[in-house]
Amino acid sequence: MRSTGRSATVIAGAALVLGCVSGPAASHPADAGKRVLVFSKTAGFRHDSIPAGVEAVRQLGSGGGFTVDATEDAGAFTAKNLRRYDAVVFLSTTGDVLNDAQQTAFEGYMRHGGGYVGVHAAADTEYDWAFYGGLAGAYFQSHPAIQPAKVAVEDRAHPATSGLERTWSRTDEWYNYRSNPRDRAHVLASLDESSYTGGTMNGDHPIAWCQTYQGGRAFYTGGGHTKESYAEPAFQQHLLGGLRWATGDVQADCRPENGYRPLLDGTSLDGWKQAGPGSFTLADDGTLTSSGGMGLLWYATSGFTSYSLKLDWRMAGPDGDDNSGVFVGFPPSDDPWSAVDNGYEIQIDATDVPDRTTGSVYGFQSADLHKRDRALNPPGEWNTYEIRVEGERLRVWLNGVQINDFTNTDPARSLADGHIGIQNHGADDQVSFRDIRIKELPGKGD
């Protein structure tokens, strides 16, 4: 059984087996933390950066509280052995690296909740194994020479990309892929093909993505060709975030996301109005943070009828007692209490009674607390809400997990047409928001 603990335990003094081993990956004494297997067998081109990559994962494990085993022996891929691991890293593997029985064992591992991390040439692996192609998300096609490029960070809540600037400039060997994974996976970052030469994906060039796949978690990054990548702090954090998500240490929404437009893109508050006391401060990195209150920052340009609203939020306090909420379905007003009296609040504060805590329709309906607790990241980590309004039905997803399904029956609070807003609750409540975006939906649903 894989550990179900939310927090990894630092492994003090654990011996970490790295590099090639002669047999299946060596085992270590049982511990309460996570365990990761790094697999770097090659049957095609071999990257000279593999040892640096293995060492980097070792260091990330030492600092991040997970044990690392490493092997190039495909014999490690048995059902019994794989059950020991919370994630398996395919580190620049190439060609056909597993036989039929080993493939079957890995498929079973993933379908029972396993984690996959693909790094760089993991996309140049197992072209005739359909399960693996779907897991990796896309196969390698070609690459130009190593050169600098600009990476556009599309998701700034996922732990693999939350610490990055909107534009990440770095040097690597930039893969072109045989297909675009965007419709099947959640794209975290993409290449700006105008910033380098040799891109062949017509301006939509994902380079890092995640997805839930047949019961497991899959993260892929196209970076990591060069030895220097693994000494680059930003790339190390990118890889660590992918590992933490794949092992289940943190949560994120990895459903495909298409068709949204920004209401708050991090550069200005155009279209938004502050009602009542307090304010929000917009930082250079696009983070919007509350202060004072009780007030409401609301989108005044237009109301909405049938839509999916997504936004990223984070509580600052160590105990999760930072009060704020997302309001929907209220009429335009400079009085913040109008939203309270005429709309609905999706609560953020995690410390109150069930119908007034994270994911609740405040004062009306609790979230599914079991699902909420499994999906919620702790204070200091980013979370993503999807709030979907269709007719009088209001549903809430937290980090990709549906936690509430509420139907309004009060004509005075009709959800059929209304505005949206975010609350600044009080002087001691600091909640941050990022990337508020919306997709308007056809019809009113059921």
Image (tube, rainbow, N blue to C red):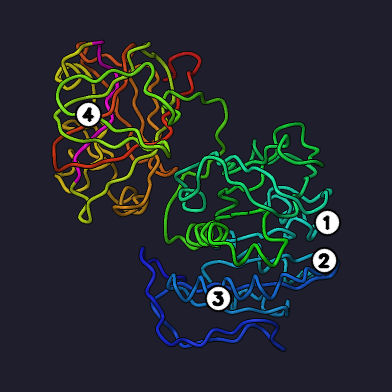
Label placed on residue 96: 2
| Residue type at numbered disc 2 | Asp
Q: Is residue 106 magenta?
A: no
Q: Are marks 2 and 3 in contact (CB under 8 Å)?
A: no
Residue 112 at least partly seen = no
Query: For numbered disc 2, what is the local secondary structure?
Result: loop
Is residue 273 shown above or below 232?
above
Indicate the quadrant containing the C terminus: top left, top right, bottom left or bottom right: top left
Quote the CA–CA distance across marks 1 and 4. 56 Å
Residue at 69% in and 76% down: 51
Q: Is residue 325 magenta?
A: yes
| Residue type at numbered disc 3 | Arg
Q: Are marks 2 and 1 in contact (CB under 8 Å)?
A: yes
Quote the CA–CA distance across marks 2 and 3. 25 Å
Seen in the image, is 297 located left or right of residue 355? right
Q: Position of residue 61 (x, y in %)?
A: 49, 73
Q: Nearer the viewer, mark 3 or mark 4?
A: 4
Structural crowding at the residue carrying mark 1, measured as other residues with C-alpha within 10 Å and reported as few (<14), some (14–19) or many (≥20)? few
User: Which residue does the numbered mark 4 point to in the structure image?
Assistant: 279
Is residue 146 shown above or below 63?
above
Label placed on residue 323: none
Query: For numbered disc 3, what is the local secondary structure?
Result: helix
Q: Position of residue 185 (x, y in %)?
A: 61, 43
